[in-house]
Image: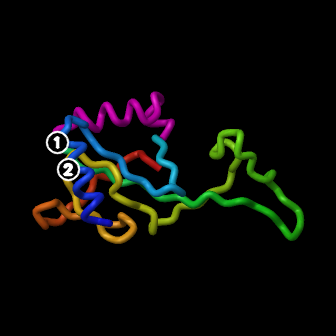
Amino acid sequence: VPNCLLELRKRLLRFGYKCVLFSEIDEFVVADGDAYHGGLSEYFEKFILSKEVKVAAVTGYQLKHVSVGDSHIEPTINFSAPLLQQRSYWYKDIFYNKPLLTKIPMIFGTGHHSATFADGSEQHPHKSALF
């Protein structure tokens, strides 16, 4: 699968996409609203225009449903409403800090927790205001 994803990224970049964002099905990628009032669109525009930054890493957080015994502090998830607006509790989890946004072909490690350039050299991604 990793080679398949590398080839897909290469193809998308070769076909003219300016960057590629990869995330797992259970992950949300959002821009820091304090830094990027225009959301992901604004973040992507600035990322694409940057000459120095080739790879950006998200800062990982875990959403938490809070309950005490049988008592739920937060309501059960309503899948017909925006999910992130339904949760107020979350905590930083460095295990999910991942380089997910790239302008160049990258080879990602297991779970996309690390990356190297396609030529094998190491990549130290830019820390971004993505979550």
Disc 2: CA contacts within 10 A as few (<14), some (14-19) or many (>=20) = some
Query: Is 33 included in the stretch rendered in magenta?
Result: yes
The stretch drawn in magenta includes residue 79: no
**Disc 1 crowd, CA 10 A, few/some/many (<14, 14-19, 20+):** few
Q: Which residue is mark 2?
A: 10
> Between 15 and 82, which is closer to the camera in this rendering?
15
Distance between mark 1 and mark 2 Cα atoms: 6 Å
Q: Position of residue 126 (x, y in %)?
A: 28, 52
Q: Residue at x 24, y 58 (%)?
A: 6
Name the amino acid, label 1.
Arg
**Residue 49 lies in quadrant:** top left
Residue 27 is situated, as x and y percent measured from the top left of the image, at: 51, 55
Residue at horizontal 36 percent and vertical 64 percent from the top: 112
Q: x, y percentage for residue 80? A: 71, 40
Foreground pick, 81 / 43? 81
Taking the spot 89% from the left edge, 67% from the top edge, the residue there is 70
Kind of residue indicated by mark 2: Lys
Q: What residue is shown with label 1?
A: 14
Q: Which residues are magenta?
A: 32-51
Per the image, label 2 sits on a secondary structure element best described as: helix
Decide: is 125 above or below 84: below
Check if mark 1's residue and mark 2's residue have beta carbons within 8 Å: yes
Judged from this view, the residue extending furthest toward the right is 70
**Residue drawn where x is 38% and y is 60% of the image:** 98
